[in-house]
Amino acid sequence: MLDLFEVITTSGVVLWSKSYAPVKTSVINSLISDVFIEERTQPGSEGKWFKKDSYTLKWTHAADVGLIFVAVYQSLLQLTWIDELLDKVKKLFVTLYEHEIKNSKGTKIQCPFDQYFDSIIRSLERKAVGTVASRPTLENTNLGAGGKVLKTDPLNTEAKDANREEDWLEAPPMPGVNTNASPKSRVPVTDKLPTDPTGIEITSASLAQTLLQPPGRRPGRARRSRKSTGHSGGSSAHASSGEERSPARVNSKPRRGKEMRVWAEDGIAGVAGEEQKLDYSGAGGISTDEEHEESMRPRAEAIDQSTWGTTTSQGDFLLKDLDYEIDDILKKANAKETKEEANKTGPSGLASGLAAGAMGYFRNFVGGKTLTKEDTEKAIAGIMTHLLEKNVAREAAVQICESVQTSLTGQKTGSFQSTESLVRIAMEDALRKILTPTTSLDLLREIGQVGESESRPYVISIVGVNGVGKSTNLSKICFFLLQNKLKVLIAACDTFRSGAVEQLRVHARNLKELSEREGGVVELYEKGYGKDAANIAKDAVAYAAGQQFDVVLIDTAGRRHNDQRLMSSLEKFAKFANPDKILMVGEALVGSDSVQQARNFNAAFGRDRKLDGFIISKCDTVGDMVGTLISMVFATGIPVVFLGVGQNYTDLRTLNVKWAVGLLMS
Amino acid sequence: MASLSPQWEFLGIQFSLTILLISLLVVVLIPIVLSRVLVASTSKTGPSSVVLLAGPREAGKTSFLLYLQEKTLVATQTSTTPSTVKLSPTALESSKSEDGDSSAFGKPFHLKDTPGHPKLRSFALTTITDPTASCLGIVYMLDSAAIIAQPRLTDTVEYLYELLLAVQKRYTVLSETTTTAEPIPLLIACNKNDLFTALPSAKISSQLQSELGRMKETKRKGLLNAGAGENDDEDLEQVLGDDRSDQITWEGLREFGVDVSLQSGSIKSGSVGGWTSWVSECLEA
């Protein structure tokens, strides 16, 4: 069953919500920030669903009015009709409140949508019950039980007594689905189906009797029947296991086929006869719910089915007012859609086509044109080529362009604004959004905090593919830290490539000379070749803690990201060294492989550990083709911490988002 | 001449027909075009007097906006787009105190709510630096209970730092061009003080100042960013406040174009009186 349904504006206001069970607001908040803002889709979802805690969330957008429709349900349930529900509710809601939403500019409006929603849910559930063999839902169960408990029709008391056991027998398998509130549902067992108008008169007579009874008695009666319910309920549990009762169950089967369950206005199940189209629900209603008795009285006297509903071809009795209204609105919305589609494919008349064409032409210049997917196609293709030329990996470029296109569809161009410029602006925004980090990247402050509060060294380890510049960038970071008067230990954990340790030794010697005046201290921790890197890293951290170092920088061996054997050792490494930051070095030169590199390294540290940042090296060699930045960040959602921009120790920079976006769009 | 005149006349009829058509077209089209342009341009250029609502996510910005508008608590979720609402000064008065004879004639103002997600903070920052929009004041909303946790404090302070830096940049630009550059009032609204774990505003104030100072220190010591030095002044690393010390105090920030004040409140329990009176003061100024 659905747990929560919300209609939210993009500005964050919950316009309407219906909750069936308490759901924390953080569930939807994380959907918004993860999927909508950071555009991180969960693996396998393809952007269709989102799982959080034990819930599954599905959603749909109405971009032109700035609405998000979110449905939340337990992941255990396989609800097949959620997509249809979202679609229907979206169409209905937008049609009903479009005007008000546009006027309110994204703030609260009054929308009495409850009834419409209930009606949609009901119709979808009915459909689902029809296809999937009668799954009892919470709602029906309650109603069915409620209806049963309160049956007070005096006419049927004998029949009721006779049939009670059978009634309760059939109740467990299909609560609320076939056990109807109407007394007439039990009549077929005793072969007394009133197929003529007298049936109504009988019920009216019984109604009169009910009315004549002093009101004080009725609750007592109800209570009595409730008591009997409890009793027979207990017996049913017993009886259902009894062998001799099974024939009754079989008997009840064919009866089900003839009955049509009908939802009355108050949500109480009733029955409509197929041949005669008799309306029993009036009588049924009166005998079911005390609270509704007052409102139900007049209806029992004047029964004219056509005035308040009809039977559909499947025999479902529909309430006229709401369901019809909804159907109408949905039909209109659908018709509008198909009409628009038809207009797109080919103009119906020459004159109207010309006029529309001329208007469209002028709007291209003047603005105020509502963009469709087709309008932006050309501009998007152009900007995609541009991105590819900037060395953005194809996979990333395609996805970014798609998200830009969907965000633009339904928008209006501004005055004297061409589609191209709008696409350009949207793309700039998208790139800026991708590159902007979500967490603080202030390394110095974090080192300070760790040193103050935990008095242990801050551990940074550097990973990457062979030859991207791990040791070089490590030295650059080391130089930066030394200038800030920190005590740094370099751990040489590349125990594989010959010369790696010597290389670091040279760096360490140089850095020591350079930083002597600044007041920083640097030391190399080395254990030679061939040993296990994870163990060396662990020892290095322990050594640093003992010697009061501020920072440990761990260099690792370069490894190909698709070599499972080499990558698997990273998980152990992360566990042993437990670094505060794992930075991955990526070359700015790498092309389409960047996406896969970033993904594989991000996944290599086990379930709970991810990369913390990228260092993009060799940025000085690519000029303005800095697409690797975008590819890597887009693939993983992990920020760029440093850029390597030259061969000197000082050539380390932090990312300036504005600069990067400027280069990419130039 | 005489022989030419019928031709002219003949041609004249022809010309007049085409001219008639063209002029008709022009007559029909110009108002359409004009109205489109005018309507579009009026909606494009934002409101003139804006009070900006900024702050980290889940602090209660949208709730505050809706509270002023609806006078009730409205459920909200994370915002992804900014929204601007036109409010009359009467919206600031609580239903209890009915003394508003001065504010009854007040001009309506706009309250701009911006998303607090780190990726979407540019909405607020551009509102400040945009030279056309006149930003009357900034309400920086924060969660006084969540600020205990270090990551949330860092997040809150980092955004505040960026915001203050943007104000400072605007002020330096303004003071170069005009002689009377007034500092922008900024209210740090400590929301959710109804919670048991909420910190008192004095404590928050000192914590923010020291944390801002520490941030300034590391920013100053930190690396240059990649674009620095390429385009001369725009992206030059600018630090908040004066260059002499890493201390940041609210008083010290006054000369850099921002007038900071701090007030606790709670939207949930309806105690927003301090904030609303601050907003109305800021409107009168």
Image (cartoon, coloured by chain):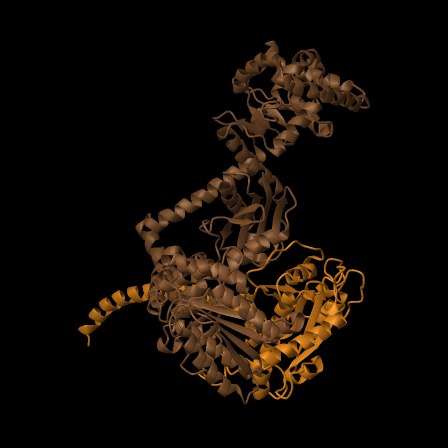
Q: Is residue B23 left or right of residue A273?
A: left
Residue A90 falls left or right of residue A214: left
Taking depth in this image into account, of A293 and A7 the one nearest to the observer is: A7
Q: Nearer the viewer, residue A596 or A39?
A: A596
Q: Position of residue B83 (x, y in %)?
A: 58, 63
- Percent across and percent down for residue A156 are 68, 14
Between A88 and A323, the one lying in front of the other is A88
Q: Quadrant of the N terminus of chain A?
A: top right
Quarter of the image that includes the C terminus of chain A = bottom left
Whether residue B2 is situated above or below residue A63 in the rendered picture: below
Instruction: Tell me: residue A271, above or below residue B100.
Output: above
The answer to whether any part of residue A299 appears in the image is: yes
Picture residue at 57% right of the left edge, 79% below the top: A487
Q: Extreme left residue here?
A: B3
* A532 in relation to A196, above or below: below
Query: Residue at the spot x=47%, y=26% of the render?
Result: A313
Classify residue A284 by image quadrant: top right
Letter of the chain in brown: A
Q: Where does the image place residue B19, in percent across and percent down from the top left?
A: 31, 67
x 64%, y 21%: residue: A182
- Residue B4 image offset from top left, x and y in percent: 19, 73
Where is A279 relative to A389, above or below? above
User: How many numbered circles are shown?
Assistant: 0
Which residue is most to the top?
Answer: A191
The quadrant in which residue B105 appears is bottom right
Chain B representation colour: orange
- In this orientation, does residue B38 appear? no
Q: Quadrant of residue A210?
A: top right
Horizontally, residue A446 falls left or right of residue A643, namely right
